[in-house]
Image (spheres, rainbow, N blue to C red):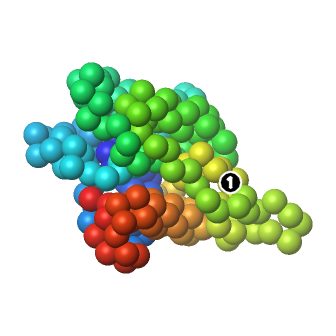
Amino acid sequence: MAFHSRGGNTRRLAEAIDAGAAEQGASTHLVDIENVTTEDWAILARSDGIFFGSPTHIGGPSASFVAFAEQTSRFQPSAAWADKLAAGFTTSAAMEGGKLGALQFMLALATQHGMLWVGQALRAGWNTSKGSLADLNRLGYRLGSVAQCNADEKPADMKESDVLTAAEHGRRMARLAQKLHGVPAVAEGLR
């Protein structure tokens, strides 16, 4: 997982995705893109799938994430990341706040590398009169995992439904990596 987190909200979502993938038996790694080491690049190279994550800033990913995306261009000529699974996640204070733009940037990054995009399989929640803030995928995104985090609150105040939605996305990515590599469920498959 390669992500940038400025205030901790995106890190919290990364940790939820990581926990979900680990529940499926995947070996996971959190790579903070502001401090990418040679070993981190090697981990990403060995990975069966990569989650990309960033806070949403002015309708797109953060400048730090964009800089990371530019650094990945060195892998494009050799198609080193081709056929890896890819997925995205983002956070913002507003209910929408440009999250779609951030996810579309990540999708474009993945397709430039020939990666296979894994969207959110959960149906949209909180879309009926009987729905609630506690519904999984309450914000209705299918392109990736998102969380809405009030600007005056801490990462610990993130809505539990957003955390659980992200964890399910992590489980889905792990299951698909296992299927792709013919590994039985709940076995190492996503590094």
Foreground: 97 or 121? 121
Residue projecting furthest to the right: 129
Rendered view: 177 above or below 118? below
Q: What residue lies at 61% left-to-right and 37% top-to-bottom?
A: 100
Q: What residue lies at 18% left-to-right and 41% top-to-bottom?
A: 41
What amino acid is labelled 1 in the image?
A: Leu
Question: Residue 74: percent from the left, percent from the top?
Answer: 23, 24
Which residue is disc 1 drawn over?
139
Q: What residue lies at 35% left-to-right and 37% top-to-bottom?
A: 82
Q: Is residue 74 left or right of residue 129?
A: left
Residue projecting furthest to the front: 182
Q: Is residue 79 left or right of residue 179?
A: left
| Circle 1 residues within 10 Å: few <14, some 14–19, many ≥20 | many
Residue 163: tell me if it is visible.
no
Question: Residue 30: percent from the left, percent from the top?
Answer: 27, 55
Question: Residue 71: percent from the left, percent from the top?
Answer: 26, 26
Residue projecting furthest to the left: 38
Q: Secondary structure at mark 1?
A: loop
Question: Residue 16: percent from the left, percent from the top?
Answer: 42, 65
Foreground: 114 or 124? 114
Residue 31: tell me if it is visible.
yes
Q: What residue lies at 65% left-to-right and 50% top-to-bottom?
A: 141
- Name the image quarter holding residue 164: bottom right
